[in-house]
Amino acid sequence: MLNCAEAIAFYDSKDSRHRLLLNGGVGLPSGSIDATMDGMRLEYCMQVGSGTFSLLPGFTYLGQAEPWGWGADFNVIQRLGRNGNGYRLGNAYTASSWIARELASWVSLSVGLRGDVWENVHGADPTLDTTFEQTMDPDLQGGRRLTTFFGINFSPCCERFLKNQQILVQGDLPIVESLDGPQLQTSWSIRVAWQCGF
C-alpha cells in the first residue's frame, strides 16, 4: 500500500510549547494480492498489498519544556470496499505516548508505549481453503499488542554536511500480545530512520 499523508497544525500555543496536529491521508492499493507459492495462493498476511483504498485519519499532540519533550498520537487505517478477491483487510488502530529528554543540542533519548489493534479480515478469498491451514481463516487475522520502545535521536544541526538531517534508532519490545489465530509473534524489533529537511 502506498500512503499519501499530510499533517496540519490545528492548535499552537503562543509559546509553541503545546501543539495539536490533525493527520489525514489516503492509502492506495499498490501491492499485489495474488502472490502464490507452488501454484497455491498465499494467505492474507503473506500478500504484499491490501487491494483496497484506505483513509488514514489521526491526531498528534506535542508538548515541550526544554530539555523535556512529550507527546501522544492516535492513528487509524480505515479500509474501504473490497478488493478483486472478495475481501478487505481489517481496520487498524494505533495509539502511542512518549517522553524525551535532550542530552545535548544534537542528541536526545526517548521512551514510550504504543498500543496496536488490528481487526479480522472482512469477507474471504474463495481460493483459500480454511480446512487446509488455519492461517487462511479470515476470522483468525486480528490481534492486539502493547509495546514499549526506547530511542535515540541524532540531529547534528551544526555540521554543514549533516544540517537539517535527523537519524533515529529505536528498539521495540512487546509487553503484551494477543493474537486471534496462528500468526507470527513479535519478539523485538529495531528500526533506523533518516530524515532530511529542505
Image: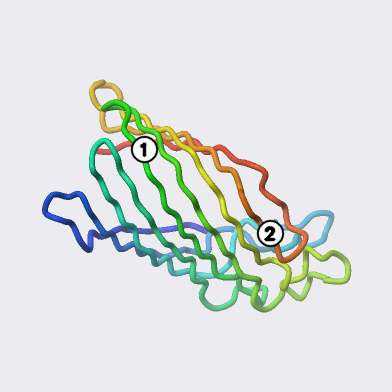
Question: What number of labels is visible?
Answer: 2
Where is residue 151, by image quadrant?
A: top left
Q: Indicate left or right for 54 with 155 as reference.
A: right
Q: Indicate left or right for 162 with 117 as reference.
A: left
Say how the picture is coloured.
rainbow
**Alpha-carbon span between mark 1 and mark 2:** 29 Å
Q: Residues within 10 Å of mark 2 (few under 14, many from 20)?
A: some
Pointer 1 residue: 195
Q: Indicate left or right for 180 with 62 as reference.
A: right
Which of the two discs, 1 and 2, labels the residue nearer the N terminus?
2
Q: Residues within 10 Å of mark 1 (few under 14, many from 20)?
A: few
Pointer 2 residue: 45
Where is residue 47? Give x, y as percent.
Answer: 67, 58
Residue at the (28%, 22%) spot, across then down = 161
* Residue 153 in the image: above or below residue 64: above
Where is residue 56? Give x, y as percent.
Answer: 42, 65
Task: Give the camera-side residue of 41 and 159.
Answer: 159
* Residue 13 in the image: above or below residue 156: below
Q: Amino acid at mark 1?
A: Gln
Q: Amino acid at mark 2?
A: Cys
Where is residue 131? Give x, y as percent.
Answer: 88, 71
